[in-house]
Amino acid sequence: MRNKTILLLGAAIAVGALGATALGQGASGPFTQAQVGAGRQAFEDNCAACHFVNGKGAPGIFPVLDGATVVNADNPSALLHVILAGARTPSTEKAPSILVMPGFAHRLSDKEAAELASFVRQGWSNQAGAVSEKEVRRMREGLAKHGS
Ligand code: HEC
């Protein structure tokens, strides 16, 4: 009997967690078929902890990706640079703490990074072009040569 109660409790928690996830995604608006794929999963696994599933980030802490210039630029290299090499805000008098985004060069294959970047460029209200594996490979080679 006691075991059964614990099982039920576990199930309730699992359902609660699923509900919360669905809510978070709902708030980010519907995704088109092209946007629902490996790239979205990679975003949720690697980026959403800081930039949130809705791409809105947190003001003053994690930059918004929905509608961001760097994300929507015709040339995706700045976005790829950030994804592969990471980024850090300079420490200023107004905002003395340095916020660091880790680089994902070692965690993502060219294919994964291309899918992820394509998702970011086409998710939410973004409408930029997809990114190819070749573009990722070129950025990776550039970083290896010149450092980040
Ligand atoms: C640990 C938290 C964290 C994670 C995880 C993270 N980021 Fe960031 N990201 C940041 C912070 C902090 C900045 C701001 C750094 C800066 O301004 O130099 C940033 C900046 C960016 C920018 C530049 C935005 C702009 O307007 O300049 C992009 C694009 C970006 N992140 C995309 C991603 C993607 C895609 C992923 C997943 C592969 C990711 N981030 C994972 C914290 C994170």
Image: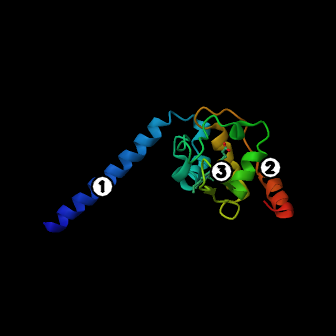
Q: CA distance from mark 3 to mark 1?
A: 43 Å
The picture places residue 21, in percent across and down from the top left corner, at 42, 47
| Few, some or many residues within 10 Å of mark 2 (<14, 14–19, 20+) | some
In the picture, which quadrant includes the N terminus? bottom left
Residue matched to label 2: 135
Most extreme residue toward the right is: 145
Please state if 13 lies on the left or on the right of 40 as rendered: left
Q: How many marks?
A: 3
The picture places residue 77, in percent across and down from the top left corner, at 78, 46
Q: Quadrant of residue 69?
A: top right
Label 3 or label 2, whichever lies nearer to me, is 3
Label 3 or label 1, whichever lies nearer to me, is 3
Residue matched to label 3: 92
For label 2, being within 8 Å of ligand 1 is answered: no
Q: Amino acid at mark 1?
A: Ile
Q: Residue at x 63, y 50 (%)?
A: 93
Q: Residue at x 54, y 40 (%)?
A: 56
Q: Amino acid at mark 3?
A: Thr
Residue matched to label 1: 13
Q: Residue at x 81, y 51 (%)?
A: 134
The picture places residue 106, in percent across and down from the top left corner, at 69, 65
Q: Are marks 2 and 1 in contact (CB under 8 Å)?
A: no
Q: Secondary structure at mark 2?
A: helix
Q: Secondary structure at mark 3?
A: loop
**Disc on the earlier residue, 2 or 1:** 1
